[in-house]
Amino acid sequence: MIMDETELCFGELAYENRLVAFFDILGWKGEIAAAGSDPRRIARLAAAVRMFSANAATVGDAGARLTTFSDNVVFSKPFAEGDVPWLLQGLATTQLGLAVQGFWMRGAVTVGLLHHDEYIVFGPALNRAHHLESRVARYPRILLDQQVLAATAGTDFIEVGEESFIDPFTPRFWDRVQAENPIAQQTLDRFNELSGMKIPAEPARVSGGTALASVANRLSAELTSIEDPAAWEKLAWLFDRVVRSLGGRAVANDLPKSARLKAALGV
């Protein structure tokens, strides 16, 4: 409700139809507490939030916008159906990269009305993405709204179902991304210059199975120390998926549990 014209001192605005991604990192408050004032740990936290920013910087679209607050990240750009696979692969790569470092990402992608400039972001599309992330996603996954899902033809990392989401936790996805994105020659040249070393132009590669085993080990370590049953359930869901992707039979419920967690779960 507009009371008088003085409330329009910045002029009128209209929403745009935009492709919107919203995500955060589960357990961020605990990560900050654990980091304390250790510069190395603080840098690790900053790197986690910046990881997607590095991908977003390659968009090349003057209408693209990125806003961050703590671990909350909002990315949007004018909607074009052909941009959906690119955005989803960027999110999938970020999600897997964060998992290797022990960060668990949850979010949502939608299309809708939004105002997003260099200072502010708001609108129905952000409300929708936030609702999907906070009320529906539950586990460390990135949900896709229906209009986004309709534009995913040709992607190989989408779990389609009643709640469709990005699934980068397969050896195949990791191997493909590495093959498509080798280390740039200028990056190698700069490393050699600064370090006084000489590494081969052909980068060493880590197999998808090895990378996912690392993720499973991180999850296992966290699951055996967690005392909050809600947090345990979220990571247990991902642990079971990763182990199945590797062809294993272990399940989170068989891992050792803290005494407090056992009491909370009634086991």
Image (cartoon, rainbow, N blue to C red):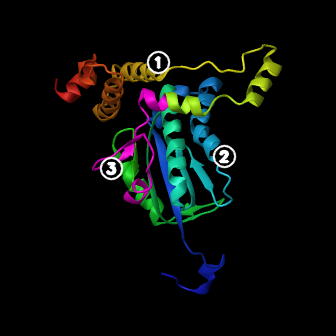
Question: Which residue is at a point 44% across and 57% down the rendered structure image?
Answer: 110
Q: Which disc, if any, is residue 112? A: none
Residue highlighted by disc 2:
58
Name the element at disc 2: loop
**Residue 53 vertical placement versus 75 (above, below):** above
**Residue 227 vertical placement versus 88 (above, below):** above
**Residue 231 vertical placement versus 152 (above, below):** above
Question: Which residue is at a point 61% across and 42% down the rendered structure image?
Answer: 55
Image coordinates of residue 17 in percent, x first then y, are 52, 67
Q: Amino acid at mark 1?
A: Thr
Q: Which mark is first along the chain, 1 or 3?
A: 3
Question: Which residue is at a point 50% across and 53% down the rendered structure image?
Answer: 84
Q: Which disc, if any, is residue 136? A: 3
In the depicted view, which residue is nearer to us: 204 or 99?
204
Question: Which residue is at a point 60% across and 85% down the rendered structure image?
Answer: 5
Image coordinates of residue 245 in percent, x first then y, are 35, 27
In the depicted view, which residue is nearer to us: 20 or 245?
245
In the depicted view, which residue is nearer to us: 1 or 209?
209
Q: Quadrant of the C terminus?
A: top left
Residue highlighted by disc 1:
210
Q: Which residues are magenta?
A: 146-174
Q: Is residue 261 left or right of residue 9?
A: left
Name the element at disc 1: helix
